[in-house]
Amino acid sequence: MRTSVPWRLAMITLGCAAFGLYLAAPHLTTAMPSGPAALEPQAAQKAPLSQEELQAEVTRLTATVEKLRKRVATLEKERRADLTQDRLTKAEQRTEELQKQLVDVSDRDATLHARLDQVNDALRPENINRAVNPMGTTRPEDARDALTRRLTNEIHQIQSQRDLLSQSRARLQASLTNADAEVERLKHRLQEELHPLE
């Protein structure tokens, strides 16, 4: 997993430092002999590192540690940028989905609006009479009343559906506004994470 890389590099850093101490330890030991080693001929022992050599070794190890520290920082920045990119992708997908839902609501409302116009036109007295006369009923007044009630009920149903669609549209528009703001916020954050000095 990518999140374990900084930890591994940190362990490598500690290992480098420990190795440096390991390299320096024999010289420090030979510089201060004790026990049986003190009885060995001086020529058989390694010459201790000079002050300049010790300083050079410390400088080298410090540079290595600093290089690894910068690499860890870079990987951590990339990890944060990847997380932000994932969130941005999901936010953009959410925005697209909300936009599709809004289009669907608008299409359904347009269909209902067209049907409402048809029913209102059918409710005009001359159209009611035209619709009832071909029926050949002996009680045309009752037929006109029944047709008027049916069309009126349909108008109420259509209006109720349009009211629900209007509420859905308002909720979707509010959600879309928030989603758009989230997308812009994440874009700005990603830009800062990728180019902090720009």
Image: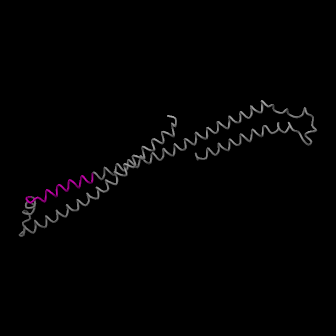
Looking at the rendering, which quadrant does residue 119 occupy? bottom left
- The spot of residue 57 in percent (x, y) is 74, 33
- The spot of residue 76 in percent (x, y) is 57, 43
Q: State the residue at coordinates (63%, 39%).
A: 69
Q: How is the image coloured?
A: one colour
Nearest the viewer among 131 and 124 is 124
- Say above or below: 121 vs 146: above
Magenta-drawn stretch, dominant element (helix, strand or loop): helix
Q: State the residue at coordinates (41%, 48%).
A: 93
Question: Would residue 7 be found to the left or right of residue 25 on screen?
Answer: left
Q: Number of labelled discs? A: 0
- The spot of residue 152 in percent (x, y) is 17, 63
Q: State the residue at coordinates (44%, 44%).
A: 185
Q: Where does the magenta region start and end?
A: 107-126
Nearest the viewer among 72 and 132 is 72
- The spot of residue 4 in percent (x, y) is 61, 47
Is residue 169 part of the magenta span, yes or no?
no
Q: State the residue at coordinates (16%, 55%).
A: 118
